[in-house]
Image (cartoon, rainbow, N blue to C red):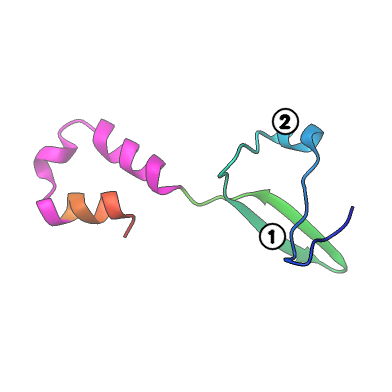
């Protein structure tokens, strides 16, 4: 596998399919000795946070407008 001049590599389709690495999936890198490991990011994405907040019973009723705006902006 070749690293491009921009430092990019292609994750083989077999691995992407097996691990569910879809386009726009966040990943994390971990250095272990002379190895570089890639895994799905453990942090929640802005969309997941928004969905969780919107599906909690009464969540929007208790949130201020500023809190809702921060949530939609990913802050």
72 sits left or right of 39 in the view: left
Nearest to viewer (mark 2 / mark 1): 2
In the rendered view, tell whether residue 40 sits above or below residue 34: above
In the image, the segment drawn in magenta is 45-66
Q: Nearer the viewer, residue 58 or 72?
A: 72
Residue appearing at x 20%, y 30% in the figure: 57
Residue 27 falls inside the magenta stretch: no
Task: Give x and y (percent) for residue 68.
Answer: 19, 49
SS type, badge 2: helix
Q: Position of residue 66 (x, y in %)?
A: 14, 56
Would residue 52 be counted in the magenta stretch?
yes
Give the side of residue 40 with respect to residue 15, left or right.
left
Disc 2 residue crowd, few under 14, some 14–19, many 20+, Cα 10 Å: few
Residue at 18% across, 38% down: 59
Task: In the rendered structure, find residue 29 and report the number of the disc placed on it.
Answer: 1
Location of residue 41 in the rendering, given as x and y in whole percent from the top left corner? 58, 51
**Which element type, helix, strand or loop, lies under badge 1?**
strand
Residue shown at 88%/57% (left/top)? Answer: 2
Residue labelled with disc 2: 17
Q: Nearer the viewer, residue 54 or 72?
A: 72
Mark earlier in primary sequence (2, 1): 2
**Which numbered tag is attached to residue 20?**
none
Q: Within 10 angstroms of label 1, few (less than 14), some, or many (20 or more) residues? A: few
| Magenta stretch, main secondary structure class | helix
Residue in front for this viewpoint, 60 or 57: 60
Q: CA distance from mark 2 to mark 1?
A: 19 Å
């Amino acid at each position: 596998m070749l690293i491009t001049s921009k430092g990019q590599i292609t994750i083989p389709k077999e691995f992407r399919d097996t691990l569910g690495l879809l386009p726009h999936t966040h990943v994390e890198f971990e250095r272990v000795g002379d190895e570089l490991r890639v895994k799905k990011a453990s942090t929640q994405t802005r969309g997941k946070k928004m969905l969780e907040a919107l599906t909690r019973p009464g969540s929007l009723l208790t949130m201020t407008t500023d809190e809702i705006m921060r949530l939609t902006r990913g802050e």
